[in-house]
Amino acid sequence: MDSDKDGKTCNIVEVEEAKGVLRLMIPIWTASLAYAIVLSQCSTFFVNQASTMDRSITPTFKIPSATIRCFALIAVLLFLAIYDRLLVTMARIFTLKPSGISMPQRIGVGMFISTLSMVVSALVECKRLALLLLGVSSVFTMVGLQEFFYDQVSTELKSVGLALYLSIFGVGGELAKRCSCIRH
């Protein structure tokens, strides 16, 4: 292996491996932006929607509109247990794979459910159901994306894979703002 001024160069195999990883990850990263836009709805638009809802539990207690985001997070926590203990276990029986379903299948299911949550929210204006579906979609999509961007890179590129995963949500949130998908 040749070295440059810093003593750090990559051989041809490492360069080709990095190119292969990028060819694999860029389409997944780009497709994941739609999910990030959907997810960004939770932190802004849903709070605005909650402001117009009747959030009274008792005559003296009213749920603050900013806490509406907690319902999606509670759905994530509840569904993670169901996902890990029930769905993955059942999928292992049918697919004979240790992970149950593949990472792209997991991501696809999550994105499908997140799309469904937005359709349900738009057609029925059922805020609570949309939050539940969004929580369920987060389990599939976020777990799948984390695994995908971490497992599909070499040990030396793990931090790059995780940075790509996290950048989806930053770019998706910015795109949501620029597309006026989030109402202020």
Image (cartoon, rainbow, N blue to C red):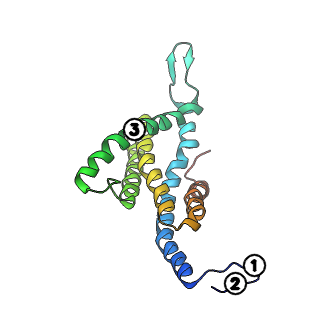
Res. 83 image quadrant: top left
Res. 107 image quadrant: bottom left
Check disc 3: other Cα within 10 Å, few if <14, some if 14-19, many if 20+: few
Mark with earlier residue (3, 1): 1
Q: Which residue is mark 2?
A: 3
> Measuring 66% from the left and 86% from the top, which residue is drawn there?
2
Mark with earlier residue (3, 2): 2
Disc 1 residue type (three-letter): Asp
Residue at the far right: name it. Answer: 5
Answer whether labels 1 and 2 touch (C-beta < 8 Å).
yes
CA–CA distance in space, label 3 to label 1: 48 Å
Q: Which residue is mark 1?
A: 6
Disc 3 residue type (three-letter): Ala
Answer whether labels 3 and 2 touch (C-beta < 8 Å).
no
Residue at the far bottom: name it. Answer: 2
> Measuring 40% from the left and 52% from the top, which residue is drawn there?
110
Residue at the far left: name it. Answer: 94
Disc 2 residue type (three-letter): Ser
> Mark 3 or mark 2: which is in front?
2
* SS at mark 1 in the image: loop
Q: Left or right? Give the position of 41 relative to 131.
A: right
Q: Which residue is mark 3?
A: 81
> Mark 3 or mark 1: which is in front?
1
- Considering only vertical position in the picture, is 21 above or below 60? below
* SS at mark 3 in the image: helix
CA–CA distance in space, label 1 to label 2: 7 Å
| Relative depth, front residue between 29 and 146 | 146
Picture coordinates of residue 75, whole percent (x, y): 44, 36
